[in-house]
Image (cartoon, grey):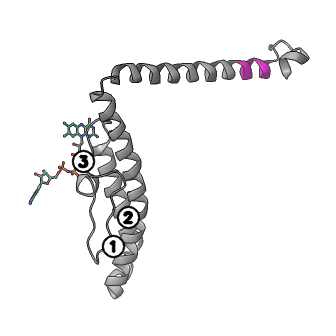
Amino acid sequence: MLPVGSKWSPRPGVTLLGDAARLMTPFAGVGVNAALADALDLSRVLLKRKVNFEADLPDNLADALQEYEGPMFERARENMEKTWGGLQHHFSANGVDDRGRAKQREAAKLGEEAELREKAKRWEQGTLPSLSLQQRV
Ligand SMILES: Cc1cc2nc3c(=O)[nH]c(=O)nc-3n(C[C@H](O)[C@H](O)[C@H](O)COP(=O)(O)OP(=O)(O)OC[C@H]3O[C@@H](n4cnc5c(N)ncnc54)[C@H](O)[C@@H]3O)c2cc1C
């Protein structure tokens, strides 16, 4: 794995995508999607400049690569952090417990959100019992 947040200085006419740009651990299952997103973004910035692209090739290419690399580095950093966290959970002595606690927190949050959605629905339907002043504060 490359260090989280790895970047390179702009190089005229050269860039990278996929694992070549930000090799990660496989512990988040995101590498292929990130590589496809890189390819899509790179093709978009090039296509945007297709009219007269060759008239000023070095500048057009430099602009296109700058527009591609900024967001790509940001996406890479987020995904690298995620897979690095995944690796630590898989191989740490407390990994299973940590993962269990994280899942419990997620479930509790989802439960709270579901309860709020249900309350909102009942409020819209006018079936939510009115709250006492104490409950409101
Ligand atoms: C065990 C494991 C499990 C994974 N599980 C998932 C998952 O579940 N979901 C997910 O999204 N991602 C997963 N990944 C990550 C995913 O496989 C990679 O992120 C993805 O394949 C990167 O694609 P890429 O095209 O950038 O590089 P690669 O797939 O590595 O393609 C590079 C290609 O270039 C070729 N090549 C290298 N050098 C040369 C050369 N000099 N000349 C010509 N050709 C060359 C290689 O042979 C290779 O075919 C996993 C990775 C591993 C290792």
Q: Residue 1: which disc?
A: 3
Q: Is 30 located above or below residue 38 in the figure?
A: above
As helix, strand or loop, the secondary structure at mark 1 comes to loop
Residue 54 figure quarter: bottom left
**Residue type at mark 2?**
Glu
Q: Residue at x 26, y 52 (%)?
A: 2
Front-lying residue, 72 or 121: 72
Where's residue 90, x and y in %?
29, 28
Q: Residue at x 30, y 28 (%)?
A: 92
| Precedes in sequence: disc 3 or disc 2 | 3
Residue 51 figure quarter: bottom left
Q: Is 130 located above or below residue 83 in the figure?
A: above
Judging by the rendered image, the residue that carries numbered circle 1 is 10
Where's residue 120, x and y in %?
73, 23
Over which residues does the magenta segment extend? 119-125
Where's residue 103, x and y in %?
45, 21
Where's residue 57, x and y in %?
32, 83
